[in-house]
Image (spheres, helix red, strand yellow):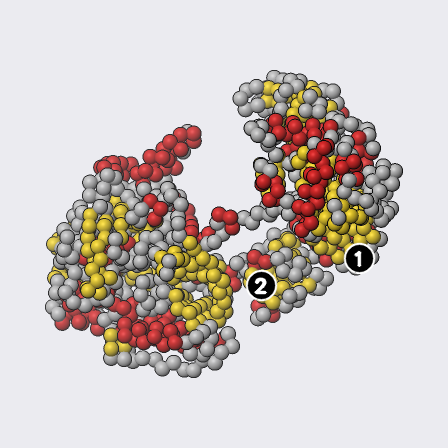
């Protein structure tokens, strides 16, 4: 297809570089320098999508980020699919493949359109809430079809092969937007030597300078932009980032910039010198000063059928003609309320096409551009507006009428004018989104009929974003702000000589948002406010009639400004309509809150390199390679990878765990316990600190001894436990749970630094420095004896809860005689880099004892048989030591009121019906209860039914020969021997007997041998 | 993301290095056993949630591992000052915040 709308000369495209592309399966040609949107318009493609709710044909409206309709699915292959790309922001490249996101089977013959035109009447705002909310169970079924009909693009089914980076940056002055004000600001700041970052979201920097009719220093405005960019490129402290959107403005001048480095070249990042390029970068910028030069978005007028393809905002018409040499039609009607939009008619006229009429809402338009139009004998219809467009897939005519803005009514006869394009302008809305991200509410200004950014510390708005959109003003405003910002960050900025620009005289704009129709809004053909979300003026009226008075509620009820649109094109019109209906002013009505991101950001850029193995760090013990080699299955405990069990041959997990359990109980097993948290505590007050931190007493713990300690929060609830050894009088070695290590260290620092700074004590994490190997079982002593000759292992000289320093397998070791299985046990600690050597030596000597490696699952079974708790499994932040039956570990007589003590005498912690730790013996000895199962006292189920507790740990014990469980039950210590019931989701009700939580060797004989 | 001045490091660092630890200046009763249940409950569970100036405890967890206090405006998120544990804030709620805002 030929480019029938392309001009023979002009524009910023490169006619020597034609590019082929495909849209909805049809091949087209454009030029280098095109956007997908300009190339589609050049080829006369009118319908680019179907609308979200009513499935109406839609065409291109705008030329930038505010485009509501031309939302496409991009990508030639499955892995390259990108949903929700605005055609106006996508540079054209050779081989580009795009498709409409809506429309089935295609945009020209849309089946949903039939449903939309019939069903549209029955789909007012709130339709989904009203229609589909009951019964709730059917919502997923409705949603599936609604989503298919709506179609907001789709995610790729294959993994994204591209790579993305995050970069932290610091600068003195960040300039967002490279239009006239931004360029002037950047230049002024940069000449001071300050570190300046200049970013702009478009393919080419320059903003409105690229399609301006005005001259700067007697030359085209774009030449001045090029000269400034050339100078900035020579300054070493300046970073210029094209194709980079400031998508979020966060606290304390932290701005995230999304730089697209290859998306103008191909759908997947091409290789350069044999390496795949980074597709996008997220710059995380901490700026001293931010200069907001984001300009304005033009507001379309709201009138009937203003969504028929061929409706554009006036500025976009100028942009397409002057920048891309594309005239998107033959016969133009311009409907405006201001002078500035006259440019569209003049540019159209310059291109040699017909301007049917300029319809101006003002009675007496007066200004330089108006006079230029008059001089060309273009018909100007004053005091009037386009009230309705005609046509289905393209505008064929407009109805124009005299209007009474104040009375909101049509005030004269209706005239029909044949045309194929309507350009409209209701005014210029400052792009306040970024400033609003910080929480600063935009402020209304009557003189410019728009909201300007609220005050943000360290941020200066320049140019159009605060009402200084005229070129001559924007340049001066930007230069002054750039100089001032550089000075505030400590630089001296030389004066910037402003280029010469002629002043353009403009008449006062009229406040026109929704255009009245001869019929009331509810009966007139649809007047679209937010085309992307299919929100109409009538919908907003209905919302206000139904009692939605807050603009935030109107937004949620109608969907205005939702999703990827974020209220760019239609929000001010919508607020104006709500204000009219509520009989209040626009500032009284207020704005909705804009949130990051300004335009959609691909998840790849958000994730950066924090994916796959870098998503969450994994920690491995010094013995990890051995475990892998020996077929261990792993379990993630916090960030640690711990062996879960070591299957042999085709063993199931159950079989492996039963075998590992028997090995420990009958001979000897070994556990890699290196992941336990380890904290060094030193200083003359170390012992006193332990007394205050732990529930039990530490005053009499001698050097060479260990003690189990229980830690509570000050509310009396157990938070951690572990064994602490006295290494020397002022030196202790603490162990914590694997998951709790970092939190316990923070906890100790908190108390030391904020409550007891007078105590002389120091803490340090040594978790990674020590490897710990626990050998458990009746043969543990015999095995260890073969590897040490300087530690007396005899029962009388190395008692349970003693520790000894010495040599194991020829390397220095600390051996702790502690037990988490109830068996005779030694925990050998060596420097981590000696671990594999010692572990291997143990296996060399241990073969004759059948030394068996075991994992966390066997550890859990063995400790549960002994009734040993695991913090976080038997406890959940609501268990006191007494709830756990651990009164023996509570030193009520200690002189200092240790952490948690006072709370243990509160009435609530003394209640007798608190949940208490018990054992459960299922009546069916083979039945392993579900962990987390709720416990009730009666077999017959009724609703409601008091639930008295839940199962915390549950296993099958090969040693006991039956299943068993630990549980917490209200008043459990008084229920020994009673039967409780566990109703399951499938209707079965299990029964179990309440027993002591210690199932095995209650007197502790086995660990004391 | 907040930019926080650590009074121990004497530098601004990114919020990622810090952890908030709730309201500052919560003193544990000196004689817990003498405290009534109500007093103890107040110490344990009751915290301010002001709109405006708030004194908060922060922890430079991925830095110097020191705790310190910050006076922060919960509406604007502006941090008016940070100061070491044991020190008194120079800006407090109810007073003019102009002094701190200049920082």
Residue located at (26% from left, 57% from top): A92
Quadrant into which the C terminus of chain A falls = top right
Q: Looking at the picture, does residue A226 appear above or below residue A671?
A: below
Q: Which residue is mark 1?
A: A683
Q: Is residue A250 left or right of residue A303?
A: right
- Residue A251 seen: yes
- Subunit bearing disc 1: A
Identify the mark at residue B13; answer none if there is no mark. 2
Foreground residue, A480 or A630? A630
- Subunit bearing disc 2: B
Is the same chain shared between marks 2 and 1?
A: no
Residue A392 pos. (x, y %): 17, 46
- Residue A573 seen: no
Residue located at (31% from left, 58% from top): A265
Q: Looking at the picture, does residue A703 appear above or below residue B79?
A: above
Foreground residue, A589 or A273? A273
Residue A469 pos. (x, y %): 32, 69
Classify mark 2: helix, strand or loop.
strand
Mark 2 neighbour class, 10 Å CA radius: few under 14, some 14 to 19, many 20 or more? some
């Amino acid at each position: 297809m030929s480019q029938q709308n392309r001009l023979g000369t002009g524009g910023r495209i490169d006619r020597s570089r034609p590019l082929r592309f495909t849209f909805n399966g049809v091949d087209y040609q454009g030029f280098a320098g095109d956007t997908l949107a300009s190339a589609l318009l050049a080829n006369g493609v009118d319908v680019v999508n179907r609308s979200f709710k009513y499935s109406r044909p839609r065409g291109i409206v705008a030329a930038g980020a505010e485009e509501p309709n031309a939302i496409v699915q991009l990508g030639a292959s499955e892995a390259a699919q990108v949903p929700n790309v605005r055609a106006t922001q996508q540079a054209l490249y050779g081989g580009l493949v795009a498709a409409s996101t809506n429309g089935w089977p295609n945009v020209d013959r849309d089946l949903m359109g039939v449903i939309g035109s019939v069903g549209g009447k029955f789909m007012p705002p709130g339709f989904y809430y009203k229609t589909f909310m009951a019964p709730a169970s059917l919502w997923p079924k409705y949603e599936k079809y609604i989503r298919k009909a709506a179609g907001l693009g789709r995610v790729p089914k294959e993994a994204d092969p591209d790579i993305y980076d995050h970069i932290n940056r610091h600068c003195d002055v960040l300039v967002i937007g490279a239009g006239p004000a931004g360029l002037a600001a950047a230049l002024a700041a940069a000449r001071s030597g300050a570190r300046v970052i200049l970013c702009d979201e478009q393919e080419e920097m320059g903003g409105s300078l690229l399609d301006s009719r005005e001259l700067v220093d007697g030359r085209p405005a774009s030449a001045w932009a090029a000269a400034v960019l050339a100078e900035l490129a020579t300054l070493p402290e300046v970073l210029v980032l094209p194709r980079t959107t400031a998508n979020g403005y966060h606290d304390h001048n932290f701005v995230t910039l999304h730089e697209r480095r290859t998306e103008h070249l191909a759908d997947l990042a091409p290789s350069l010198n044999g390496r795949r390029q980074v597709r996008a970068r997220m710059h995380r910028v901490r700026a001293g000063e931010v200069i907001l030069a984001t300009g304005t978005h033009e507001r379309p007028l709201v009138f009937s059928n203003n969504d028929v393809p061929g409706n554009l905002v006036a500025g976009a018409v100028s942009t397409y003609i002057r920048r891309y040499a594309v005239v998107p039609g033959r016969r133009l009607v311009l409907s405006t309320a201001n002078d500035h939009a006259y440019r569209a008619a003049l540019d159209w006229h310059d291109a040699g096409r017909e301007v049917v009429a300029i319809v101006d809402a003002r009675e007496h338009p007066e200004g330089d551009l108006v006079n230029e139009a008059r001089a060309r004998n273009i018909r100007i219809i004053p005091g009037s507006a386009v009230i309705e467009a005609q046509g289905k897939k393209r505008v064929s005519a407009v109805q124009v009428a005299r209007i009474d803005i104040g009375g909101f009514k049509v005030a004269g006869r209706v005239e029909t004018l044949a045309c194929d394009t309507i350009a409209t302008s209701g005014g210029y809305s400052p792009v306040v989104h970024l400033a609003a991200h910080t929480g600063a509410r935009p402020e209304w200004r009557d003189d410019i009929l728009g909201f300007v950014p609220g005050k943000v510390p360290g941020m200066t708005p320049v140019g159009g974003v605060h009402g200084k959109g005229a070129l001559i003003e924007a340049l001066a405003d930007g230069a002054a702000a750039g100089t001032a910002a550089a000075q505030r960050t400590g630089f001296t900025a030389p004066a910037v000589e402003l280029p010469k620009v002629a002043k353009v005289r403009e008449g006062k704009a009229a406040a026109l948002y929704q255009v009245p129709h001869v019929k009331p809004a509810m009966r007139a053909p649809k007047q679209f406010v937010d085309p992307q979300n299919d929100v109409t003026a009538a919908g907003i009226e209905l919302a206000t009639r139904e009692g939605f008075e807050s603009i935030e509620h109107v937004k949620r009820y109608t969907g205005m400004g939702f999703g990827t649109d974020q209220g760019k094109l239609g929000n001010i019109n919508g607020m104006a309509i709500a204000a009219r209906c509520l009989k209040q002013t626009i500032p009284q009505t207020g704005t909705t809150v804009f949130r990051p991101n300004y335009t959609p950001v691909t998840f790849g850029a958000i994730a950066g390199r924090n994916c796959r193995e870098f998503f969450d760090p994994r920690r491995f013990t010094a013995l990890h390679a051995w475990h892998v080699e020996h077929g261990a299955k792993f379990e993630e405990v916090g960030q640690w990878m711990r062996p879960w069990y070591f299957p042999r041959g085709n063993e199931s997990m159950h079989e492996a765990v039963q075998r590992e359990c028997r090995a420990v109980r009958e001979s000897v097993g070994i556990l890699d316990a290196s992941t336990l948290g380890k904290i060094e505590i030193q200083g003359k007050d170390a012992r006193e600190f332990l007394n205050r931190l732990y529930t039990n007493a530490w005053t009499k713990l001698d050097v060479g001894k260990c003690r189990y300690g229980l830690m509570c929060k000050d509310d009396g609830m157990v938070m951690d436990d572990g064994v602490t050894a006295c290494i020397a009088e002022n030196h202790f070695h603490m162990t914590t749970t694997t998951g709790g290590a970092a939190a316990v260290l923070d906890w100790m620092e908190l108390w030391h630094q904020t409550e007891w700074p007078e105590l002389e004590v120091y803490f340090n994490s040594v978790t990674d420095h020590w490897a710990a190997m626990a050998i458990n079982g009746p043969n543990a002593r015999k095995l260890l004896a073969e590897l040490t000759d300087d530690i007396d292992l005899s029962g009388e000289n190395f008692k349970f809860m003693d520790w000894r320093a010495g040599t194991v397998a020829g390397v220095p070791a600390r051996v702790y005689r502690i037990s988490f299985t109830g068996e005779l046990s030694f925990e050998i600690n060596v420097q981590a880099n000696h671990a594999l050597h010692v572990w291997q030596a143990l296996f060399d000597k241990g073969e004759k004892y059948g030394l068996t490696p075991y994992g966390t699952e066997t550890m859990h079974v063995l400790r549960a048989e002994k009734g040993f708790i695991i913090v976080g499994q038997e406890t959940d932040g609501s268990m006191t030591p007494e709830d756990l039956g651990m009164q023996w570990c509570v030193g009520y007589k200690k002189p200092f009121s240790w952490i948690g003590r006072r709370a243990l005498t509160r009435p609530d912690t003394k209640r007798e019906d608190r949940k208490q730790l018990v054992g459960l013996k299922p009546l069916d000895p083979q039945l392993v209860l579900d962990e987390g199962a709720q416990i009730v006292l009666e077999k017959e189920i009724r609703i409601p039914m008091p639930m008295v507790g839940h199962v915390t740990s549950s296993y099958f014990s090969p040693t006991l020969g039956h299943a068993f469980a630990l549980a917490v039950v209200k008043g459990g210590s008084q229920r020994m021997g009673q039967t409780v019931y566990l109703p399951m989701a499938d209707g079965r009700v299990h029964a179990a007997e309440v027993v002591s939580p210690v199932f095995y060797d209650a007197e502790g004989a086995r660990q004391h041998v | 993301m907040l930019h926080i001045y650590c009074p121990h490091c004497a530098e601004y660092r990114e919020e990622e290095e810090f952890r908030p630890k709730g309201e500052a200046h919560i003193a544990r009763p000196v004689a817990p056993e003498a405290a009534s249940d109500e007093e103890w409950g107040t110490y344990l569970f009751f915290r301010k949630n002001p709109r405006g100036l708030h004194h908060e405890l922060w922890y430079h967890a991925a830095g110097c591992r020191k705790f310190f206090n910050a006076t922060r405006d919960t509406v604007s998120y502006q941090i008016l000052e940070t100061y070491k544990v044991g020190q008194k804030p120079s800006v407090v709620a109810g007073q003019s915040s102009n002094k701190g805002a200049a920082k």
